[in-house]
Image (spheres, rainbow, N blue to C red):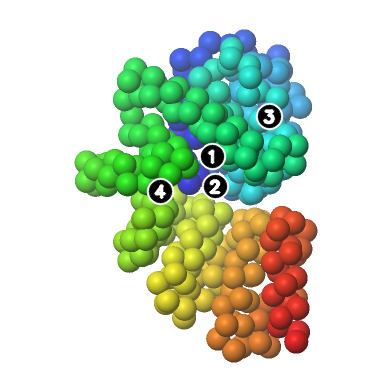
Amino acid sequence: MVSRTLHLFILLLILVTQDVAAHSPAKNISEIHKICSKSPAQCLTEVNLTLLTTKEQSRIWYDLMQYKIESLFLLQNINELNAVTKPWINIDDLPVPFKVSIYIYYAKSLAFDNDINEKAIKAESKKYINKAEQQLDLMHNAYPDPMLLIQLANIKMYVGEYQQAYQTLQSLAVKYQRRQDPAFKLDLYGHLAHLADRLKYKQQAIDYWLESIVWAKRYDNDQQIATVYFNLAQSQISNYDFDAAKQNYIKAIHYSTLANDGAKKAQAQYFLAKQLYNQGLKIDAKAIVEAVDLSSLSLAENKRLLELKAVIDQ
């Protein structure tokens, strides 16, 4: 979810000693943090602008790049994410939080790297996920923080260690049940929901997504609200609660429109159209499909959408 890497970076930024920026950025870092906590699309715009007047590899530059990487991932600009992270993967002399993010997001972008085959992708991905886990273990031992445990759980989920990650986060949910930090709770319950989905705990996944919606709205981030509604709908589909899923796809479309998140909007439209078609509502499904902005989808998603459109048009 939105907060895990940004909070990790902010937490440890004071430990990083780098040169300051040569010029004052267009907005100071606290202003940019406020923007990035609300809208990844606006964040990306502001960060790219500010990077133009910021000394490369200064403390502020690393901070801005951290926001950029997170925003690219949240907006599912995976090709650009790969292009931004790849040049840094073998450079060891980097601030540790930045290095961790580079490892994680490079690994997550590898599926879209056309230069390596599927077998190599798995090996390369595991290599950098393991590197990230090693760094996070060291960081947590030196500076214990529950956000680091969520980040570690995210890595374990990525490499398939679902049960261990699930148990860790359930313990955190009990320990920090009184904590009223929307970003922390959104991240915690969102990861618990993802893990419950992976473990086929269908009702628990739905319950955790419903809890996540509460915290996403308190966090006041339309992009994250859209993402949680979309994920809730996906869980409801797997639990055969089709009518509820349709309503939540519609909410995901609404909030992703507010957030200017074209990728999430197009994905929600595709799955809504698919569900409408499965329920025999071909006219409604056709209207949704024709409204999708194909440029917001990946090649694979475009193919799926066109296949659905062909079936609907029969």
Q: Earlier in the sequence, mark 3 or mark 4?
A: 3
Mark 2 Cα shell of 10 Å, populated few (<14), some (14-19), many (≥20): some
List x then y, in percent, for residue 60. Answer: 61, 21
Q: Are marks 3 and 4 in contact (CB under 8 Å)?
A: no
Mark 4 Cα shell of 10 Å, populated few (<14), some (14-19), many (≥20): many
What residue lies at 71% left-to-right and 55% top-to-bottom?
298
Judging depth in this view, the residue of 217 and 293 nearest the camera is 293
Question: What secondary structure is found at the residue carrying circle 1?
Answer: helix
**Mark-to-mark CA distance, 2 and 4:** 19 Å
Q: Which residue is mark 1?
A: 34
Front: mark 1 or 3: 3
Question: What secondary structure is found at the residue carrying circle 3?
Answer: helix
Q: Are marks 2 and 1 in contact (CB under 8 Å)?
A: yes
**Which dot marks residue 86?**
3
Q: Are marks 1 and 3 in contact (CB under 8 Å)?
A: no
Q: For the residue marked with disc 3, what is the amino acid? A: Lys
What residue lies at 74% left-to-right and 64% top-to-bottom?
303
What residue lies at 73% left-to-right and 63% top-to-bottom?
302
Q: Earlier in the sequence, mark 2 or mark 4?
A: 2
Q: Which residue is mark 2?
A: 38
Q: Residue furthest front?
A: 119
**Which dot marks residue 272?**
none
**Which dot marks residue 191?**
4
Q: Is residue 180 visible?
A: no
**Mark-to-mark CA distance, 2 and 3:** 27 Å
Front: mark 2 or 3: 3
**Mark-to-mark CA distance, 3 and 4:** 26 Å
Judging depth in this view, the residue of 179 and 306 nearest the camera is 306
Q: Earlier in the sequence, mark 1 or mark 4?
A: 1
Q: For the residue marked with disc 1, what is the amino acid? A: Lys
Mark 3 Cα shell of 10 Å, populated few (<14), some (14-19), many (≥20): some
Question: What secondary structure is found at the residue carrying circle 4?
Answer: helix
